[in-house]
Amino acid sequence: MEEGDEYRRWDELIPDALGLIFRNLSLQEILTMVPRVCKSWSRAVSGPYCWQEINIEEWSTRCHPDHLDRMLQMLITRSCGSLRKLCVSGLHNDTNFSFLADQ
């Protein structure tokens, strides 16, 4: 870096900013690709920053109910109580609703 050049490295962005950026990616990209880029990105997608709004509606219509239960629990746990919006289809039992209410 030359003197006078000012820029920030992607891995130095605060997790909130990374979370806002990552919300534009698909669920698959956030869960499988982003964590492999660097440690700070992995921490960002493991924390609540990407999980304030969870939209798995399309995916949930195609998946097995057991997979849906596990995915929903994982994502809601990652939100650490910051979940504001959830879009999902096919909840088959009251356990999911109880888990949502508890979190």
Image (tube, rainbow, N blue to C red):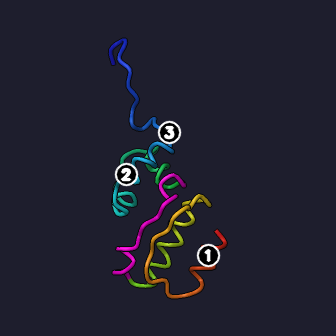
Asked if the stretch drawn in magenta spans residue 71, the answer is no
Mark drawn on residue 36? 2
Q: Quarter of the image containing the N terminus?
A: top left
Is 51 inside the magenta-drawn segment? Answer: yes
The residue sitting at 45% across, 75% down in the picture is: 88
**Residue drawn at (34%, 55%), measured in percent from left and top?**
25
Give the residue type at disc 2. Answer: Arg
What's the magenta region? 48-63
Judge whether 14 appears above or below 100 on screen: above
Picture layout, residue 22 above or below residue 3? below
Q: What distance separates the C-alpha of mark 2 from that of mark 1? A: 29 Å
Assign a secondary structure to mark 3: loop
Q: Position of residue 45 (x, y in %)?
A: 46, 53
**Marks 2 and 1, the one that precedes in the sequence:** 2
Residue in front for this viewpoint, 36 or 45: 45
Q: Could you say where residue 95 lies in the image, as x and y percent from the top left? A: 59, 83
Q: Residues within 10 Å of mark 2 (few under 14, many from 20)?
A: few
Q: Which mark is residue 99?
A: 1
Q: Nearer the viewer, residue 53 or 6?
A: 53
Q: Secondary structure at mark 2?
A: helix
Mark with earlier residue (1, 3):
3
Mark 1 vs 3: CB contact within 8 A:
no
Amino acid type at mark 3: Ile
Kindly report the distance in space between the C-alpha atoms of the residues bearing marks 1 and 3: 30 Å
User: Where does label 3 land, which residue?
Assistant: 14
Q: CA distance from mark 2 to mark 3?
A: 18 Å
Query: Nearer the N terminus, badge 2 or badge 3?
Result: 3
Residue 54 at what x, y percent from top left?
A: 46, 64
